[in-house]
């Protein structure tokens, strides 16, 4: 697995586009998130369809074509330096193939931020554009609005990426399997990674990668099923290490932990758990596509280079 192209860091005054590729934005959360971005001296612009709701499928933020057009137009706008998602939910898989990836490749690299359902877009940017992205908080997410460490992690990564070359887990992180491992970071929401299997542009293997995993709302037997699927198709063969984030609403953590240890412990690679990214009360920004070293005993991931240039 080779490192991916890194986009440029943000600077005061940069314009960032906010898109909603998945679920609809509800309430005033997005407005509060925009205020945070403005307080960072950024110029956020909400894309035309980002506040819409699909007329027949209320779990989608507008029509698939409209959501794809927002992403394409934001990426191809030369005045935009970054694209930040408003929220997750469901819907990326429906719109990903409708975006104009040829035009986006021609527009060049930019910062892209999101998590949860947005994992499918992280994979698309990696496989279709060879672009490093940021698994991090979204503009309308409650964690971004209320958790200072979540905000600071993203801000430091965007503006001073060299200051967060070493990513430290939150207090409470544990070593599941000791050791050190080197690889290129990848991953995100476990269910979305599995859902990408067999698709035309899906990643054929995670070989050579430091795999980041988290999820929300999946009971222990469902997590078992998903991990078993990845094991059966050989997708996890050659993974160098595993970093586990949050498992919100997946049941008692010790039951979840038993599944993770059972399915991942046999890989023979270092594993650290409860690192502090994903759907938990704190969502640390985790760069994807960057060569790094996992120290499962020290609970750190050290990037070879800053996430952004």
Image (cartoon, helix red, strand yellow):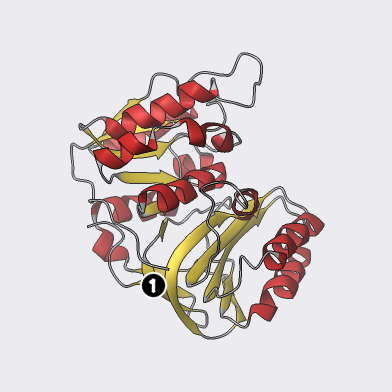
Residue lying at 31% horizontally and 34% vertically, measured from the top left: 103
- In the rendered image, residue 136, in percent from the top left (x then y), is placed at 44, 50
Q: Is residue 302 above or below residue 194?
A: below
Q: Is residue 297 above or below residue 263?
A: below
- In the rendered image, residue 109, in percent from the top left (x then y), is placed at 27, 46
Dividing the picture into quadrants, the one containing residue 233 is: bottom right
> Is residue 219 in sight in this rendering?
yes
Q: Quadrant of the N terminus?
A: bottom left
Instruction: Say whether residue 83 is left or right of residue 120.
Output: left
- In the rendered image, residue 116, in percent from the top left (x then y), is placed at 56, 46
Q: Which residue is mark 1?
A: 292
> Is residue 40 in sight in this rendering?
no
Residue at the outermost top position: 55
Binning the other alpha carbons within 10 Å of mark 1 as few (below 14), some (14 to 19) or many (20 upward) gives many
| Front residue of 242 and 204 | 204
Label 1: which secondary element: strand
Dividing the picture into quadrants, the one containing residue 176 is: bottom right
Residue at the outermost bottom position: 179
- In the rendered image, residue 210, in percent from the top left (x then y), is placed at 49, 70
Instruction: Say whether residue 148 is left or right of residue 231.
Output: left
């Amino acid at each position: 697995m080779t490192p991916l192209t890194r986009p440029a860091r943000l600077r005061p005054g940069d314009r960032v586009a906010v898109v909603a590729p998945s679920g609809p934005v509800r309430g005033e959360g997005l407005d509060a998130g925009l205020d945070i971005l403005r307080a960072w001296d950024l110029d956020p612009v909400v894309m035309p369809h980002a506040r819409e709701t699909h007329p027949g499928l209320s779990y989608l933020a507008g029509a698939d074509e409209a959501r794809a057009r927002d992403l394409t137009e934001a990426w191809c706008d030369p005045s935009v330096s970054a694209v930040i998602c408003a929220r997750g939910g469901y819907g990326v898989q429906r719109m990903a193939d409708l975006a104009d990836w040829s035009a986006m490749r021609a527009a060049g690299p930019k910062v892209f931020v999101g998590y949860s359902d947005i994992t499918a877009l992280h994979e698309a940017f990696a496989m279709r554009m060879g672009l490093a992205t940021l698994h991090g908080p979204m503009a309308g997410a409650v964690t971004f609005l209320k958790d200072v460490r979540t905000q600071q992690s993203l801000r430091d990564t965007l503006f001073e990426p060299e200051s967060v070359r070493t990513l430290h887990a939150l207090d409470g992180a544990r070593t599941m399997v000791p050791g050190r491992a080197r690889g290129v970071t990848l991953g995100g929401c476990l269910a979305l990674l599995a859902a990408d299997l067999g698709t035309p542009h899906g990643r054929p293997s995670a070989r050579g990668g430091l795999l980041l995993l988290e999820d929300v709302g999946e009971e222990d037997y469902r997590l078992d099923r998903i991990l078993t699927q990845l094991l059966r198709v050989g997708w996890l063969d050659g993974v160098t290490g595993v970093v586990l984030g949050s498992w919100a609403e997946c049941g008692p953590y010790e039951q979840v932990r038993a599944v993770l240890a059972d399915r991942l412990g046999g890989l023979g690679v270092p594993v650290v758990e409860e690192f502090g990214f994903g759907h938990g009360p704190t969502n640390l920004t985790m760069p994807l596509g960057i060569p790094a070293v996992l120290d499962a005993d020290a609970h750190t991931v050290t990037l070879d280079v800053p996430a952004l240039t």
